[in-house]
Amino acid sequence: MASTQGSSPRTNRKVITILSIDGGGVRGIIPAVILSALEAELQRLDGPDARIADYFDLIAGTSTGSIVTTFLTTPYPLPNASNGSTTNRPREAKDIQKFYIEHGPEIFAKKEDPAQTSKSESFLDGLKHLIVQGVEKVLEYKYRPSSLSEKVDEQLGKIRLADTLTNILVPAYDIQHLKLVTFSSHQARKTDSSVKLRDVVMSSAAAPVYFPSHNFKADGRMYNLVDGGVAANNPTLLAIQEAAHIFGNRDYNYLILSLGTCSEEEEHQNFIHLTGPLPWMIDLKRVTPPLANVLFKTSADMVDAYTLFVLGVGGRISSQNFLRIQDNTLKPEQLTMDDASQENFDSLIDIGQRLLEKPVSFPSSVIGLQPVTTNRDALMR
């Protein structure tokens, strides 16, 4: 997949190249590891100035994937540039790994506990204080958005959605009108939209429970948005739809690289013992509630199935033009979205590197073919 330019080896039709990146919190460093390996190979072939954005007609990313997407496709700001001036080249993929490691601990910093109750307080006053404190913890979002906003501003500044170096698509979810919203750089250029990339990222990354919704005004309308993963954690299908909109429905070949952020091993997903609504919502042994796991897993399976259908199983679909890199064998404790410790990042980087050496499993396993190569080999050819 490293050779993405030109025509398909089987036809003379133009190849439309698409990169899709799932959501997953700090696990966004996993696709960053994979893209670093791909970009290193591209630089070996085409020179040190080669960047991921040069090889894809469209890049789509949800939630943490929106961070990777925008960082890959925007001019890299000059160090300490107070006037907002930028270079005309994007950052390297390996710099995105550094972003997660350096700024993750600040973005996912635990809130400071309120001051302890005074020793002079009565028992009842102290009990009331603890009850109020407990209720506030339940009702408040887990993290303040200010740290994420600050770091995104440092990286993206005032760059508009219309200013990306290749086409991008980022989904978010409108909680006022209960519908999916997609931020398209192609559409933004057509309408000279004023939407800024920092608002796109803050919207798509506003994961419920973790961060509050992101509200902003642009192009004469008000946006009230949360994490795009609510509707499209894997944006591959949206990317195919967007590519068809941009390039028309002519008989193009698609070359698609879809990067997951890993999911739980099936043996850990046995929910048959759950009875009543509360256990579906709360499970102290799990990182995410069982209901959320079921919904995300079902959504992911449907995207995979429909992608195969849209591209045509047995026709143009094969590991030659569609590569899904995903690991579905993680333990529950490895799936946290907000563990920004160095130990966890080291583990996630190792997962990404080992994933490169695993056999291609999708779509081969779905359409009955035996995997004949590793993910790394499939990327580099």
Image: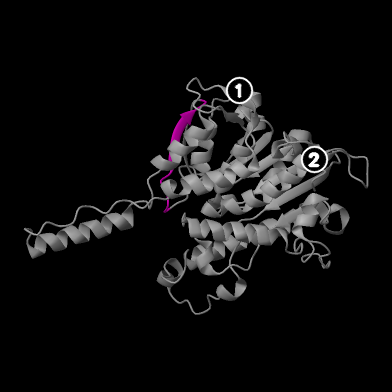
Where residue 272 appears, as percent x and y from the top left, is: 53, 78
Residue plotted at (49% across, 56% down): 342
Q: Which residues are magenta?
A: 209-219
Where residue 118 appears, as percent x and y from the top left, is: 11, 56
Residue 309 seen in this snapshot: no
Report the disc number at residue 192.
1
Q: Secondary structure at mark 1?
A: loop
Spatial separation of the CA atoms under disc 2 and disc 1: 25 Å
User: Is-magenta flag for residue 211?
Assistant: yes
> Mark 2 highlights which residue?
16
Q: Which residue is outermost to the top?
A: 83
Report the disc number at residue 322.
none
- Name which of mark 2 and mark 1 comes first in the sequence: 2
User: Is-magenta flag for residue 355?
Assistant: no
Residue type (three-letter) at the residue carrying disc 1 = Asp
Q: Residues within 10 Å of mark 2 (few under 14, many from 20)?
A: many
Q: Nearer the viewer, residue 70 or 132?
A: 70
Q: How many marks?
A: 2
